[in-house]
Each structure stands twice: as structure tokens, then as C-alpha cells.
């Protein structure tokens, strides 16, 4: 898909304990999600590039493909919308 020129892009960063999350929104829609967990050892640096695969408004959640064969879940409650 081609990107439109007049897209409002916002990056939201949330730090909670040992975990840092970064979300990229385009026109208020989550399009990228990164997670870094200091205590986790599964990946060096634990920064994940993800692509939104499915959004379930009734659950207020998005399923993010981070390349692990199973999608990660991002709940709306985990996003700091006040930072927008």
C-alpha cells in the first residue's frame, strides 16, 4: 500500500518498570509497535518491530505480528493516549 502524503504520524513512548513500549500511529491508527524488556533474554536488546494484523474494538486490543509465528497482543489500556 502506498503511503498518503497528508498522514498525521505520532510516536508514543511508554516506560513501565523494566519494559519500554513504542507505538507509531498514523491518523490515530496503530501501525507499528516496539517492545523492549530489560529482564527478558529471548532477543538481544528486546526491541520488536511489529505490524498490526487485526484490531478487535470490542476487546480494545490489537494483534501485532512481531515475527514469532504467533501475534503479540497490545491492549488499548497499555497505550498512553494522553501523550497524543
Image (cartoon, grey):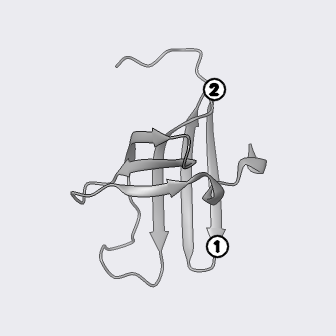
Q: Name the mark nearer the viewer: 2 or 1.
A: 1
1 versus 14 height, above or below? above
Q: Residue sitting at 55 percent across and 73 percent down?
A: 19
68 versus 46 height, above or below? above
Return the residue nearer the eye: 59 or 39: 59
Label whose residue precedes the other's in the sequence (2 or 1): 2
Q: Residue sitting at 38 percent across and 17 percent down?
A: 2
Q: Residue sitting at 32 percent across and 74 percent down?
A: 44
Q: Quadrant of the C terminus?
A: top right
Residue 74 image position (x, y, % from top left): 50, 55
Disc 2/disc 1 C-alpha distance (Å): 26 Å
Q: Residue furthest right?
A: 82
Residue 12 image position (x, y, % from top left): 64, 49
Residue that label 2 marks: 8
Residue 16 image position (x, y, % from top left): 64, 73
Q: Quadrant of the N terminus?
A: top left
Do labels 2 and 1 touch, CB within 8 Å?
no
Residue 79 image position (x, y, % from top left): 63, 54
Disc 1 packing (10 Å; few <14; some 14–19; many ≥20): few
7 versus 61 height, above or below? above
**Which label is found at residue 74?**
none
Callout 1: SS = strand
- With 44 as the anchor, is 8 left or right in this view? right
Name the quadrant containing residue 68.
bottom left
Callout 2: SS = loop
Disc 2 packing (10 Å; few <14; some 14–19; many ≥20): few
Name the quadrant containing residue 14.
bottom right
Residue that label 1 marks: 16
Q: Residue sitting at 56 percent across and 79 percent down?
A: 18
- With 84 as the anchor, is 8 left or right in this view? left
Amino acid at each position: 500500500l502506498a503511503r498518503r502524503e497528508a498522514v498525521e504520524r505520532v510516536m508514543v513512548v511508554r516506560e513501565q518498570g523494566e519494559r519500554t513500549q513504542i507505538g507509531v500511529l498514523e491518523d490515530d491508527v496503530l501501525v507499528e509497535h516496539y517492545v523492549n524488556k530489560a529482564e527478558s533474554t529471548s532477543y538481544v536488546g528486546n526491541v520488536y518491530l511489529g505490524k498490526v494484523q487485526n484490531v478487535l474494538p470490542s476487546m480494545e486490543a490489537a494483534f501485532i505480528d512481531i515475527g514469532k509465528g504467533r501475534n503479540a497482543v497490545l491492549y488499548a489500556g497499555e497505550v498512553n493516549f494522553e501523550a497524543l
